[in-house]
Image: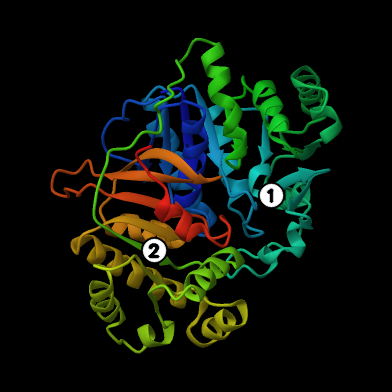
């Protein structure tokens, strides 16, 4: 293993794995920290569900992942965070980065969530989503991790016990040597973590080259784009043009959407506007104890012979706020996740073999419910969202051939669901 990645949610894990595969690096994603040895791959991504848990729990699980990756021979560690850097004032990005640096005896790292292909750029330390500052985007009303400050130096400094500085765009524009010199100056000034500006893929490649010797990188998935070529230059791996190939499968297709992000709501609206089969989950009905999952599965069973189906709990922000006020934010989310997880299991039992899942928390719940312990990473449907092939390393949990597309709620255009179902995961 060359690169060990610790991802703070399931869709983020497939996101960064997709970038590595795209560049020719054989990559395997595991679900949680396995008991056994690391799989044979150039890169191994450990998918955790630590973005919104208490900071101490996130630190504990991340350190366990680091220990397991180090036993597999990892040469460099990558802490993958969301491209919107979403967190709470108490963490978890800062506390986990601090803990990983302690464990790796790392005196410096960068933090760069930029992913220009998906409209996430960092300029003068401020994160933009498209043309808007993060604090002006839909993330300002996120139900779990609202982001009301786009100044990432300020955001991270509140969370970290290390001094946080800035690696500016004008330095990055001068190339890897200038970046390395600036890092040396920041270190001399007592800075241990630097928010790195990046507005293009070339900026990310420059940062990757300049930071190749750092034990730890904290970043969104974009920074991973430049790493495989650097490893190949060192003779550590041979880039594989077939790294993204998956096995063929056949059967029904379904979409499960638990995210209430602006992007997912637009995707749900586009599907329903085309008069395609859709079943809407009512969290209030779940709270009343109604058998919503069973009803959804009966409905899906009648539809699946003819068409792919959408089962969703997505809703506009105002409606979501009303539901959360009535049921409680955590309770409403847990009810929906548990319901969609039961539905996913039921759909697979009924012959569904291609499953698109929208939302990081929803994806985590679905993968766990299906008994998936490992994912092979295939080609990207859109930037940051690949098809994957589900595998189980547990002999008592055999899985049928199954392709999963685990989508961050904020990713993809309005036609993403249809684009995913039309894509060939084996190509």
Judging by the rendered image, the residue that carries numbered circle 2 is 255
- Decide which of 245, 335 is in the foreground and name it: 245
Circle 1 packing at 10 Å, graded few (<14), some (14-19), many (20+), is: some
Circle 2 packing at 10 Å, graded few (<14), some (14-19), many (20+), is: many
Residue 360 visible, this angle: no
- What residue occupies the far top of the structure in this picture? 235
Q: Does residue 46 lie above or below 231 as drawn?
A: below
- Residue found at x 33% / y 55%: 367
Residue 382 visible, this angle: yes
- Residue found at x 45% / y 61%: 361
Q: In the rendered structure, are the residues bearing label 2 and label 1 in contact, judged by CB atoms less than 8 Å apart? A: no
The residues bearing labels 2 and 1 have C-alpha atoms spaced at a distance of 24 Å
Considering the numbered disc 2 on the image, is that residue within a helix, a strand or a loop? strand
Left or right for 289, reference 65: left
Considering the numbered disc 1 on the image, is that residue within a helix, a strand or a loop? loop
Position of the C terminus by quadrant? top left
Where residue 72 appears, x then y in whole percent? 36, 25
- Residue found at x 67% / y 59%: 89
Left or right for 192, reference 407: right
- Decide which of 155, 206 is in the foreground and name it: 206
State the image quarter where residue 107 is shown: top right
Where residue 76 appears, x then y in whole percent? 52, 25
Judging by the rendered image, the residue that carries numbered circle 1 is 119
């Amino acid at each position: 293993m060359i690169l060990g990645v610790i991802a703070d949610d399931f869709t983020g894990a497939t996101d960064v794995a997709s970038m590595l595969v795209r560049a020719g690096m054989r990559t395997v994603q595991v679900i949680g920290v396995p008991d056994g040895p690391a799989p044979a791959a150039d890169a191994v991504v450990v998918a955790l569900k630590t973005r919104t848990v208490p900071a101490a729990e996130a630190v504990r699980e991340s350190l366990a992942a680091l220990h397991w990756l180090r036993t597999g021979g990892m040469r460099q560690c990558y802490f993958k965070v969301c491209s919107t850097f979403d967190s709470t004032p108490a963490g978890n990005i800062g506390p986990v980065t601090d803990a990983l640096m302690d464990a790796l005896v790392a005196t410096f790292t960068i933090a760069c969530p930029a992913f220009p292909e998906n409209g996430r750029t960092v300029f003068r330390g401020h994160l933009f989503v498209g043309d808007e500052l993060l604090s002006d985007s839909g993330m300002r009303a996120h139900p779990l991790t609202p982001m009301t400050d786009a100044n990432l130096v300020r955001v991270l400094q509140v969370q970290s016990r290390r001094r946080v500085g800035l690696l500016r765009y004008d330095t990055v524009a001068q190339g890897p040597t200038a970046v390395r010199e600036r890092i040396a100056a920041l270190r001399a000034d007592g800075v241990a973590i630097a928010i790195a500006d990046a507005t293009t893929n070339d900026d990310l490649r420059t940062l990757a080259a300049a930071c190749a010797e750092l034990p730890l990188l904290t970043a969104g998935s974009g920074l991973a784009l430049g790493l495989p070529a650097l490893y190949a230059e060192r003779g550590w791996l041979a880039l594989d043009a077939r790294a993204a190939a998956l096995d063929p499968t056949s059967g029904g297709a379904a979409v499960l959407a638990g995210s209430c992000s602006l992007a997912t709501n637009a995707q749900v609206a586009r599907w329903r506007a085309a008069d395609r089969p859709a079943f809407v989950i009512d969290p209030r009905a779940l709270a009343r104890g109604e058998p919503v999952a069973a009803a959804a599965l009966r409905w899906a069973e009648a539809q699946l012979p003819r068409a792919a189906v959408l089962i969703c709990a997505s809703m506009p922000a105002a409606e979501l706020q009303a539901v959360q006020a009535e049921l409680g934010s955590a309770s409403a989310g847990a009810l929906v996740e548990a319901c969609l997880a039961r539905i996913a299991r039921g759909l697979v039992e009924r012959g569904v073999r291609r499953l698109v899942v929208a939302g990081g928390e929803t994806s985590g719940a679905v993968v766990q419910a299906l008994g998936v312990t490992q994912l092979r990473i295939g080609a990207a449907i859109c930037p940051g969202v690949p098809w994957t092939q589900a595998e189980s390393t547990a002999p008592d949990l055999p899985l049928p051939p199954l392709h999963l597309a685990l989508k961050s709620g904020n990713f993809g255009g309005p036609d993403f669901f249809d684009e995913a179902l039309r894509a060939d995961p084996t190509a």
